[in-house]
Amino acid sequence: MAVSWSNIQTEVEKAVLKYLDAKDEDRDAKSFWKDVMTCYGVEARSVGAFEERVKVYGRSGVAKIDYFAPRKFLIEHKSRGKDLDDAYRQALDYFDALSDDIKPQYIIVSDFARIRVYDLLAKGEEKMTEFALEDFPQRIRSLAFFAEEEVREYKPEEHIDVRAVRVIGKLHDALKVSNYKPEHLPRLLTRLVFCFFADDIGIFEKNAMRRYLEEHTKSDGGDIGNKLSNIFDVLDTPDGTAGSENVRQAGMDDTLKSLPWVNGGMFAGHIDVVFGTKEIRDMLLKCMEFDWAYVSPAIFGSMFQSVMNEKERHDLGAHYTSETNILKVINGLFLEELKAELEVAATNKERLNALWDKIAAITLLDPACGCGNFLVVAYRELRAIENEIIRRIHGREDKRSAAHAASHGRLDLGDVKLETISRLSVERMYGIEIDSFPAEIAKLSLWLIDHKMNMELGKIFGKPFKKLPLTEAPHIVQGNALRLDWESVVPKNKLTHILGNPPFLGHHLQSHEQKEELENTLHNLPSVGVMDYVSAWYVKAAEYIQGTQIRCAFVSTNSISQGEQVGILWGDLLFPLGMKIQFAHRTFRWSNEATGKAAVYCVIIGFGLESKKRPVLYEYADIRGDAREVFAKNINPYLVDAADVIVRNRRVPMCDVPAMQYGSKPTDGGNLILSDEEKGDLLRKEPAAEKYVRRFLGADDFLNSEKRWCIWLVDAKPDELRRLPEIMRHVELVRVFRSISKAAATRDYPHPTLFRQITQPDKDFILVPRHSSENRRYIPFGLFSQDNIVADSCMAVGGATLYHFGVLESEMHMSWMRAVCGRLESRYRYSKDIVYNNFPWPETPTEAQKKAVADAAQEVLDVRKKYPTATLADLYDPNTMPTDLLKAHKTLDKAVDVCYGIKGFKGEPERLEFLFEQYKELTITKVV
């Protein structure tokens, strides 16, 4: 069943408002839960019953469960203010009285004000979650099981999986200290982890390996290595299953006999025997005390890799793509579409079989697969859909009554064999990984998730299902994806999708080899030096999928959809290859729990050769929050619903407006720049120097009302300077600083009296900070006289008028800036060549319209002056912006819109569509 979480959230918000003041259980509880289930698209009477009768041991008469859905959930509701612990104890009494085959996984207790959910299969902190009714719209996934969806709280992933990795980390350290061969250590750990999982998830008899090591090894650990070798050998020895010949020795220990033949290459090949110690034995047994059945292969694999790097281990959770973000990729790439088709198919056998054939043909390649977490999550989700298809088809064919099947939760296989019913295989999972250890983990993780999904399939028919020996293996190739021919990994006529999270590295973080790979992949374009490393995967994928219907989607740094990189990646490379954006997530914050780790700002871009009729754009009002799904007419490379245009670097403005220049750069070692205090000291010693001291305007100075000064000696007379020893002392310090510079151009610059680069306007100017917070709706600009010196952290538009200031400070220009500018992390990085010089100004405003803009702009400046103690950072913080300043800006916005012949827009998407169309028309008529 396809679930629209945005619709559920909207409906839950309505329900919360309806029951915000509800108090009485008898009057409101039943209608409350009916309405809540309706929010999830569930009719209460179709999945369970209110006031279900149950006989509780030790009590007379018959008790009534407030609501019970067999095998799913049980609700015990109380009047407002009642003790939820008491309600839970009462619910547990009901739970104990139910027969095992209908016991629910979840217990819900509530008093209207609070909702508490217990997952009876979870352990520790994951067992219970509680939230206030008013927070319900933000916690809708806590009741995802209402909609037959997996509950995903997406809590910080510092939980059971992290604890498992830390246990392995200690074992790794113990083996390393014992001087075990480092080249064999990854393979040994991979085998051990497989066995730890196998001991707890049904591949082995429960705790078989743990029992064997506890009972058959010496306490000093001296023989632990030989016993492990025995286990590994047995797991690689045919046992007579699957048509093999049983070649195991007859006198083998019973526990070893019980171990299955695994095959698949996991235990093939020699690795050195561990010469054990008491510490190693104790660590092994400690690892097996952990219940590996609760560890997710989707997450564990990536964190497992960090075990091998002690510097990374303390930051577990920082080195993998979270499941939340993986699902963002696969949902847009294929999963939401498949779920929608499943909903349409309902119980129609023909449609279900057609969908089954479709998902069975899905073949995936992750060309930077790491530990395989994208492939693992994707395979798990595909198997979950297949299991639902099987449930529906065989439920329809089950010759017993529907009521019997529902009450027992098991279906009849008929003549079909459980071992062959699944049409999906890990053999359709392909990956490329540069390092050998993650490649091994990727194979292991895929085998483990395959086993878990086989167990889920077995539950449908009430039969255990182990797919051993392993006869199918994922295709994980160790190699450099940018140097490999992807056709040698998987022929493209076999592939349906490419996905993943290729490495993103800015130019300055790339190694020499990575720069070379990037240049080669991007065909040595002149501007390749500004490109992020991840762009190479886009080009490789686009070239590989030519002549196919393969769809691709990558998580990437947001820089590839901003600024100068867009023109190179899309204009020069991807558009000529016929690429179309099929869905996209605009910038969102991908954070982690690691102390001191900076957040990464990402986009997700789905692309291919086919145009989608309704491409989906996921927008984030809060980059730390959830996305809003928007159907677009077209998604352009700036991830905006607008025409496919490229905004390239332009040296002069496209329209007839004053030029913008970068500020002046001193390159002086700080010797020409003065604080307020330093200025005062200088002028006390040398009053005649005052005419050479100017206000120095940097971005921080401007935005935070800080004052700095500079020694400005342009056109200064030599004889005057020689009479100013303090000024000359600063000049000498500049000369010395530049003389020892590594840059030849700086060493050779012959003027220590001057800034290294001078671009100061000779007229009054608009000041534009080059970087500004993304939280500001309007970047504050300023108007200054030419006596103020512009620092290189700002830019200036010399000779500009109030009209120019008004247009630049308007929503029209701010929307354009947000769409095309570069970013520093998530902050705006204003560029004159991309933003200003390409901005489509109003073409033919009347004098009256220009005056209206100038008047509104002056009002903005006047309102700012009403708050003399506030900085511009204070005034333009959205949480503290004065209402009269916001009102002045809105008036200015309207005046500027009129200059374009527009009365207003419904929102920024419509405004951007207009601006890109204006830009497109101007580029046809203007010469760059």
Image (cartoon, grey):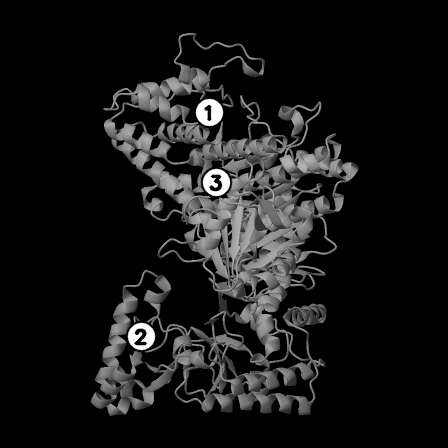
Q: Amino acid at mark 3?
A: Ser
Asked whether the residues under the numbered discs 2 and 1 touch, taking CB atoms below 8 Å apart as contact, a structural biologist would say: no
Q: Would you call the spot at circle 3 few (<14 residues within 10 Å), some (14-19), or many (20 or more)? A: some
Identify the element where label 2 is drawn.
loop
> Residue 204, which numbered label?
1
Asked whether the residues under the numbered discs 3 and 2 touch, taking CB atoms below 8 Å apart as contact, a structural biologist would say: no
Relative to 502, does residue 39 appear above or below in the rendering? below
Query: Which label's residue is closer to the chain start, 3 or 2?
Result: 3
Q: Amino acid at mark 2?
A: Pro
Residue drawn at point x = 57 percent, y = 81 percent: 658
Q: Amino acid at mark 1?
A: Phe
Q: CA distance from mark 3 to mark 2?
A: 63 Å
For discs 3 and 2, the disc positioned in front in the rendered view: 3
User: Does residue 576 appear anywhere in the picture?
Assistant: no
**Residue 537 location in percent, x, y?**
56, 46
Residue drawn at point x = 72 percent, y = 68 percent: 924
Residue drawn at point x = 41 percent, y = 46 percent: 124
For discs 1 and 3, the disc positioned in front in the rendered view: 1
Per the image, the residue denoted by label 3 is 296
* 139 horizontally vs 743: left or right: right
Query: Which label's residue is closer to the chain start, 2 or 1?
Result: 1
Viewer-proximal residue among 544 and 615: 615
